[in-house]
Amino acid sequence: MKLSNGKLAALIIALVIVIDQAVKIWVKTHFYYGEEMQITSWFRLLFIENNGMAFGMELGSKLLLTLFRIIASAAFIYYLWRMRNRTDVPKGYVACIALITAGALGNVIDCIAYGLIFNNPMPPQVAQLFPPDGGYATIFNGRVVDMLYFPLCEWDWPQWMPMIGGNHFVFFQPIFNIADASLSVSVIVLILFYASYLAKSTPQEKAESSEISENSESSENSENPESSKNSESPESIE
């Protein structure tokens, strides 16, 4: 069964959000803040929270950042809706846009709801879902839950090196979540494999040109039904 662009996007978004939120809720209710679980030498679960963007980056006001995320998510959803029945758009491109949308929505949920549905106890206590005394923050002010940590390699810089000499370095240091990974990986894939497609025109122009073309064809067929019929059946003219 071949999925339309709309169904493919909806399936990807739903799957990523469900997995992302399931992992976040499990970590939030089973780990105290800062607790770490080593899975392998290069992969650990480390529970932290942040107010910022992907990979714990901070940028401006918390409320403004949440509103920006909501607007961006709505824009991507609208873009996907415009592409839902188009056959000229690569499925991989649709999947990437859906993954970006899912990543943005996954963190939007944290910002909107987590301050209301979780408390924030001091370690080593873990958070409670729907605490009787209410959450730790108001709506739009929840913190994003991160837990994926990949310290792939680490070393100490030689003492003779300026500025960084003697410092301990870990690669890769950022701690992130599944929504962050969904967003970041899809952006990289877009750049590597769909740069030429993106360069053709803006998303709005692509959608508008497709719509104009479809309307033009349907208008011509409705105005000249006999011409259309004759062009399809040349043998009948003979």
Image: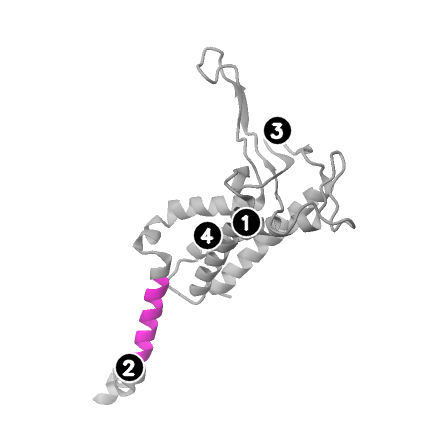
- Within 10 Å of disc 2 (Cα), the crowding (few <14, some 14-19, many 20+) is few
Where residue 182 appears, as percent x and y from the top left, is 52, 47
- In the image, which is nearer the foreground, mark 3 or mark 4? 4
Of the image marks 3 and 4, the number of the one nearer the N terminus: 3
Distance of mark 2 from mark 1, alpha carbons?
A: 55 Å
Residue type beneath disc 1: Thr
Classify mark 1: helix, strand or loop.
helix
Where residue 1 appears, as percent x and y from the top left, is 51, 66
Classify mark 2: helix, strand or loop.
helix
Magenta range is 206-221
Q: Which residue is disc 4 drawn over?
A: 96
- In the image, which is nearer the foreground, mark 2 or mark 1? 1
* Marks 3 and 1 in Cβ contact (< 8 Å): no
69 horizontally vs 21: left or right: left
Residue type beneath disc 4: Cys
Distance of mark 2 from mark 3, alpha carbons?
A: 67 Å
Residue type beneath disc 2: Glu
Where residue 78 appears, as percent x and y from the top left, is 46, 62
Q: Which residue is disc 3 drawn over?
A: 41
- In the image, which is nearer the foreground, mark 4 or mark 2? 4
80 horizontally vs 154: left or right: left
- The answer to whether 170 is drawn above or below residue 110 in the figure is above
Distance of mark 4 from mark 1, alpha carbons?
A: 22 Å
Q: Quadrant of the C terminus?
A: bottom left
